[in-house]
Amino acid sequence: MRGRNKVIKLIMVTLGAGLLLSFCLTAGTAVIAIALVLIALGLLMQN
C-alpha cells in the first residue's frame, strides 16, 4: 500500500513536470512567433 502511494506520487510529479515543460515550450514558441512578427512589422515600417 505504501509503495503504491510512492508510485502515484512519482506519476503525479512526472505529469506535473511534463505539463510545465510543454507549457514552457508552447509559451516559448508563442513568444518567438510574436517577436518575429514585431521584427517583420518594424522592418516593413522602415521601408
Image (spheres, grey):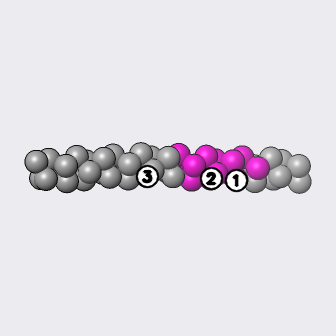
Residue bearing mark 2: 16
Amino acid carrying label 3: it is Ala
> Which of the two labelled residues, at mark 3 and mark 1, occupies the earlier sequence position?
1
Helix or strand or loop: what does disc 2 sit on? helix
**Magenta span covers which residues?**
10-23
Helix or strand or loop: what does disc 3 sit on? helix
Residue bearing mark 3: 27
Residue 21 on image: x %, y %: 57, 49
Residue bearing mark 1: 13
Answer whether residue 1 is visible to the viewer in this image.
no
Question: What is the total number of numbered labels drawn onto the structure image?
Answer: 3
> Which of the two labelled residues, at mark 2 and mark 3, occupies the earlier sequence position?
2
Residue 45 on image: x %, y %: 12, 53
Distance between the Cα atoms at labels 2 and 1?
5 Å
Q: Residue at x 10, y 48 (%)?
A: 47
Q: Is residue 44 magenta?
A: no
Amino acid carrying label 1: it is Val
Distance between the Cα atoms at labels 3 and 1?
21 Å
Q: Is residue 25 left or right of residue 17?
A: left
Are the residues tagged 2 and 1 within 8 Å (C-beta)?
yes
* Residue closest to the eye, 36 or 22: 36
Amino acid carrying label 2: it is Gly
Around disc 1, counting alpha carbons within 10 Å, would you say few (fewer than 14), some (14 to 19), or many (20 or more)?
few
> Which of pointers 3 and 1 indicates the residue nearer the eye?
3
Q: Residue at x 81, y 53 (%)?
A: 5
Q: Residue at x 50, y 46 (%)?
A: 25
